[in-house]
Image: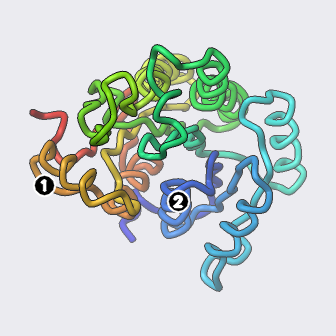
Amino acid sequence: MIREYDLTGRTALITGASGLLGVEHSSALLESGANVILTDINEKILKETYKSLLNTDNEGRIFYKIMDVTNEENIQNVVRELESDGLNIDILINNAAIDPKVQENSVVETSRLENFSIDDWEFQLKVGLTGAMLCSKVFGSYMANKSGGVILNIASDLSVLAPDQRLYKKHGLSSDQQPVKPVTYSVIKHGLIGLTKYLSTYWPDKGVRCNALSPGGVFNGQSDEFVENLAKLIPMNRMASKNEYRGAVQFLCSDASSYMNGQNIVMDGGRSAL
């Protein structure tokens, strides 16, 4: 392993660790030698994720904690529990989010702005944006009072692009019934970039830096029609595989990126370059 990428002796905490990319981020940091704390709100799925990642190479370096990113007291309790276990957080990956799948018929009507409920707006922002702020507040303060660290916010290519709603169009539905990517998704991802820039200038004197990673569309069993239509918008003519972001996570969380701060790394196959 290249020395600058070696995370041996450092501890990383990942929110939303049971999600599609949360698992990949965790695997990437385990591969780089870090101790990894998996966190999520669903205990059953979190335990399953922990078991799926545990092997003889990382035994003793992987742990899990049930954590609600919207509850500051709960986050503070996790810090205390980790301290009592002798684990000091050096890396925070804010990955937790609500991502409604607009292909599902259940959200055809409610995803549209005209019908989007204030309850959905507040809940999704609370998890995806407020949760990232709270975790950054608690764990960032902890890092600043120790020996510094890294905060990585997981955004999206929709942090720099508007969603192309034509991707979600369904045949046989009137225009006012067509599913769309909800307004919350873009607002949250754009907001994470603002949070990233803010944090990058907040604790640099304490050795805490912050960057964002904005993945493009990741293949996860979507319909052939959706995959084909999205591929047409991407110069590389394909969606990403879920493991293609591992190297970027290793780079952004390690000393290999020691002079990078306040940046949004967009990995979308070139879609945002058009």
Q: Which residue is mark 1?
A: 237
**Tag count:** 2
The C terminus - image quarter: top left
Quarter of the rendering containing residue 194: top left
The residue positioned 36% from the left and 39% from the top of the image is 214
Callout 1 secondary element = loop
As drawn, which residue projects farthest toward the bottom? 56
The residue positioned 44% from the left and 23% from the top of the image is 112
Q: Earlier in the sequence, mark 1 or mark 2?
A: 2
Whole-percent x, y for residue 77 in the image: 88, 39
Label 1 and label 2: CA atoms lie apart by 34 Å
The N terminus - image quarter: bottom left
Residue 244 to residue 169: above or below: below
Q: Amino acid at mark 2?
A: Leu
Please state if 91 lies on the left or on the right of 175 as rendered.
right
Is residue 141 something one can see in this rendering? yes
Whole-percent x, y for residue 116 in the image: 53, 19
Callout 2 secondary element = loop
The residue positioned 48% from the left and 46% from the top of the image is 104
Label number found at residue 7: 2
Q: Amino acid at mark 1?
A: Asn
Whole-percent x, y for residue 229 in the image: 19, 48
Circle 1 packing at 10 Å, graded few (<14), some (14-19), many (20+), is some
Is residue 247 something one can see in this rendering? no
Circle 2 packing at 10 Å, graded few (<14), some (14-19), many (20+), is many
Please state if 263 lies on the left or on the right of 208 as rendered.
left
Please state if 163 lies on the left or on the right of 202 as rendered.
left
The residue positioned 69% from the left and 46% from the top of the image is 89
Q: Nearer the viewer, residue 210 or 3?
A: 210
Whole-percent x, y for residue 165 in the image: 29, 30
